[in-house]
Image (spheres, rainbow, N blue to C red):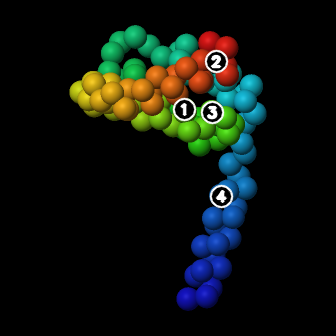
Amino acid sequence: MKKLLRVAFVVLALTACGAEQLSTNETCSEANAIVTSAGSEGDEDTREAGRQLEDLAEKASDPLKEHLALLADVASANSEGRDEIMNDPERSAEVEDAYTTVSEVCNF
């Protein structure tokens, strides 16, 4: 049992060390590339951009990490799920705040 715990600890430590955090400029650059390259063909393009933003949020700089994760959740949802989120005043305000923060920090 102790051996298993040690192995699990080593794997977790190596995984955490392998995920390098991006600077804010790098995060903004990648976010801009994701948004710019997102197609306008509808739901599938939006969900793909959401998956890419989710990956970015995992390594994003601290000022943007939570905001990108929230935007990724919204974009990854299907159109009905996005409508539901945006029709909830509290969630809609959170999304607007996340969008505003990312836009301001990244000068979009």
What amino acid type should be assigned to the residue bearing mark 2? Glu
Q: Is residue 80 visible?
A: yes
Task: Give the structural element (helix, strand or loop) at label 4.
Answer: helix
Task: Give the structural element (helix, strand or loop) at label 1.
Answer: helix
The residue wearing badge 2 is 104
Q: Are marks 3 and 1 in contact (CB under 8 Å)?
A: yes
Residue 103 x, y percent position in the rendering: 60, 18
Residue plotted at (64% across, 72% down): 9
Residue plotted at (63% across, 65% down): 12
Q: Is residue 47 visible?
A: no
What is the C-alpha distance between the residues marked 2 and 1? 13 Å
Q: Are marks 2 and 3 in contact (CB under 8 Å)?
A: no
What is the C-alpha distance between the residues marked 2 and 3? 11 Å
Residue 6 location, quadrant? bottom right
The residue wearing badge 3 is 64
Badge 2: few (under 14), some or many (20 or more) residues near its Cα, within 10 Å?
Answer: few
The residue wearing badge 4 is 15
Q: Earlier in the sequence, mark 2 or mark 3?
A: 3
